[in-house]
Image: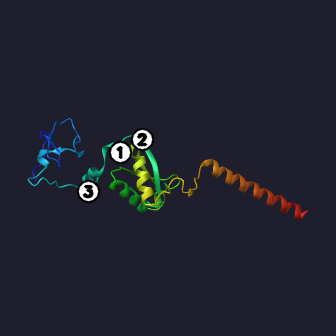
Amino acid sequence: MTRPRPDDPLVCPRCATTHSLDERFCPDCGMPLVYSGAVDGSGDLELTELQERARKIKPQLSEGPLTKVAAGRNQAEAEFIQGLLLEEGVPSMLKRSAGSDVPDLLAAGRRDVLVPRSGVDVARDVLMESELLPAPGSGVTRAVDSPSRILLGLLSALVLVAFIAWIGTELLV
């Protein structure tokens, strides 16, 4: 395989049509364009693992701010979810969940799976098909630990402790 030069024309590895240097994706099939020197005689490319992953991503699903669509209990589960999404062309990113950012945990701890806003609907469909998310209207809900719920729980515990302390002082008198 010859080494590509920046002055080589861009070509689509799937349909072999040439394109100008301004374009990044083939308008016909949506594949990322490569320099013509990167294609050997058989039309196949030697791709690294990162290039293989990048070719699976659908460009229309990679626009917008990142949005959380799922969470894994650990890094392995989050990477499994990420692989499911990649097979459908949805790019994703993993981020340690709040409260799980202790470096000593290494692969342990929750991970949030984030996808671009344009891929949220496809990602949720993939996760529902895989039964990793409950279907809407199924009656199955996940508990959300919002700050107000946590504060309510702490206040309830404080009231309970104060009541027990008051009862204890009344019994001693």
Q: Which residue is mark 2?
A: 65
Mark 1: which secondary structure? helix
Frontmost residue, 109 versus 104 = 109
Residue 131 image position (x, y, % from top left) = 46, 60
Question: Disc 3 designates what residue?
Answer: 49
Tag nearer the camera, 1 or 3: 1
Q: Residue at coordinates 33% horizontally, 43% vertically from top-left?
A: 60
* 142 horizontally vs 75: left or right: right
Residue linked to disc 1: 61
Marks 1/2: CA distance? 11 Å
Q: Residues within 10 Å of mark 1 (few under 14, many from 20)?
A: many
Q: Amino acid at mark 2?
A: Pro
Q: Are marks 1 and 3 in contact (CB under 8 Å)?
A: no
Foreground tag (2 vs 3): 2
* Residue type at tag 1: Leu
User: Which residue reaches farthest front?
Assistant: 137
Q: CA distance from mark 2 to mark 3?
A: 26 Å
Query: In the picture shown, does residue 124 fall above or below 168?
Result: above
* Image spot of residue 94 (x, y percent): 41, 53
Q: Residue at x 73, y 55 (%)?
A: 158
Q: Residue furthest left?
A: 41
Which residue is situated farthest in the bottom direction here?
172
- Frontmost residue, 105 versus 132: 132
